[in-house]
Each structure stands twice: as structure tokens, then as C-alpha cells.
Amino acid sequence: MIIDAHAHLIPVFSGSFGGGELRDCGGGRMQFLDGSTAQIIPEELYIDHGFTVETLVSEMDKADVGKALLIQAYYYGIHNLYVAEAVAKYPDRFLGVGSFDPYTVQKEKIMDLLIHKYQFRCFKFELSEGAGLTGFHPDFQADGPVMEPVYRRAAQENIAIIFDVGKKGTLGFQIDNIAKAARSFPSVRFVVCHLLAPELGEDMGQWTENMKKLAACDNIVFDIAALPWNVREAYPYSTAAGFVRRACDLAGADRLIWGSDVPCVLTLSSYREQYAFLKDSGLFSRKELEMILGGTAERLFWNL
């Protein structure tokens, strides 16, 4: 079964980022405070002011994707309640990922609700300057005291911690901090998103060194979501496939999980192409593909 370990629902655009608030401006586009806009949802999939769970289920069925992990992003808005409703409506298709600001004074209460009332098994934290914690809290450190209560709870309740670190050279790109946190809490599963977001022309040497630092921690796994989006080349995304091959050699297929990052990636290519490029590359064995496209995610999130 193919599992998408990085899918978004957007019931309505209500996000914010370091440059101000975001709003819906129709047709699947969102507007930034400076007046610029971006196409986030394909216009034909923009239904009821967003990207709904019914739309996601329909697109998954068309692309033969069996299950998905519902990731949230400050960029689109935090929608814990909508994600919980989606999981309750389609329990065989989805697992929910909770999000919150770890600086909030009520984070213990929030964690209680997310874990015990809504049955979330993962927490996701966006670290990027543009759309994450370091844009609002520039002193944030992934191994700092504000996160220690979160990690302690994760260890107690078997909760996975998901980090989106953003682009290299920014405040959120905290490779050493995440590695230190993982070593300090070895029973906690950590997921680093987007395979460190490599781009076309990326320095493979520096990327490899950063991957090695994280791969040295056995409790860190990597999602490979949005690699075609970040690399921005024509199908079959040979550069993206090359990065996944290198990651497989460094960490093993049992520590890689495929994700799409829908809906934004659907503005450039099809849902099926988000994973088909791995099959078409000829770089992976059948066993590796089985793990990357679903087996690893099944083990990490569903078979607890």
C-alpha cells in the first residue's frame, strides 16, 4: 500500500508567517500582507474555500494512495479540529498530526487534548523563518528548554516529533540542534521533512554532511516530501531521485518515508507523479520502494 506521509488539508486559509498574515483571495490563491499572491490549490480542486478532506480522498483514490498522515503548517493555518474530524470520518485512511506553538503557556493542556481527546500520535513543528517558529521566535532552539516538556511528553506517550527545518542558511535550519535533541531523547521518534529541501544545483557535499549528522541518530527518519517541487525540473525528476538514492545509501530505506506535500505540488504536476518518479528512475530495488512508499510509514505510525 502506498502511504502519503505528508499531506495537508486546508479548510480555509487562515495562516500567518514572519511577514504577516495570509488570506484567501479566491480560486485557490492566497494573499500575503505585502499584496503578493501565490497559487496553493489548483483552481479545479479549490472547493468550499479550501482543500477539503473529501477532495483529498478523491485525489488519493485516483492516484492509488491508500493512507495519509495529515500534516499541518502555520503557513496555511493550524486546523487541529478539522484534522481530528477528518480522521474520525475516515479512520482507515488517515492519522492526524497535531500542531501548536510550544511557547504557549497552556501547552500541557493542549498536548493532553491532542493526545487523549483527538488521538493524535505525532506533533509537527515548522521551524522556518518564512512560515515557522523562528519567524516569530528568532531565539528558538530545537534542543532548548521550551521543547523539553514536549519531548518528555513524547517519550511518555509514544508521540513522534516532526520538524520542517526550512532552507539552509536560515534560523530554522537547525541540524546540530535536532541531532542533540534526538540524542537526549533516544526513545522519541523524530522525522525531518523534505530531506533537508535540496534544490537544483545543491552542493551535494554539504547536503551529505548534514544528512550524516542526522542519520547518525538511529531515532531520526526522513520524509522526502516535495522534492520535485523544490528541485523544479521536468519529469522524471532525475535530480530529486538522485538525492533520494543518496539518502537511501546514507540512512537506509527503512528510515525514508514518501510524502507528497499536497495540495501545493498539484499546481505543477500530478499526484501520481509525486511517487512514480522513484519507480521510473530505476535506482531502487523493489524492497526499497516498498519501504519508502509505505512500509516505513506503516511501521512508524500505524503499527504501534
Image (spheres, rainbow, N blue to C red):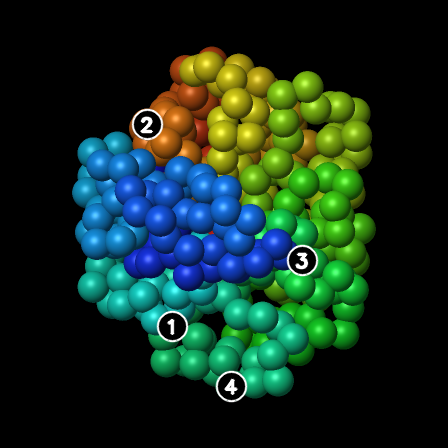
| Residue at screen point 39% across, 27% down | 268
Residue wearing tag 4: 109
Residue under the image location 26 percent in, 53 percent down: 49
Q: Is residue 157 left or right of residue 142?
A: left
Q: Position of residue 160 (x, y in %)?
A: 54, 62
Image position of 78 with respect to 174: above or below: below
Which residue was labeled with disc 1?
Answer: 119
Cα gap from disc 1 to disc 3, whole angstroms: 29 Å
Task: Give the residue pinned by disc 2.
Answer: 270
Question: In the figure, is residue 247 to the left or right of 142?
Answer: left
Determine the residue positioned at 73% across, 39% down: 168
- The answer to which quarter of the image holds residue 188 is bottom right
Q: Secondary structure at mark 2?
A: loop
What quarter of the picture does the C terminus occupy? bottom left
Indicate which disc, 4 or 3, sits on the residue closer to the N terminus: 4
Distance from the alpha carbon under mark 1 to that under mark 2: 31 Å
Q: Amino acid at mark 4?
A: Lys
**Tag 4 and tag 3, C-beta contact below 8 Å:** no
Find numbered disc 3 in the image and state the secondary structure of the residue it sits on. helix
Looking at numbered disc 3 in the image, what kind of residue is underneath it?
Gly
> In x, y percent, where is residue 192?
61, 48
Q: CA distance from mark 4 to mark 3?
A: 24 Å
What type is the residue that disc 1 sits on? Gln
Secondary structure of residue under mark 4: helix
Asked whether residue 165 is in view, the answer is yes
Q: Bin the neighbour count of mark 1 within 10 Å (Cα to Cα): few under 14, some 14-19, many 20 and up.
A: some
Residue denoted by label 3: 135
The N terminus - image quarter: top left
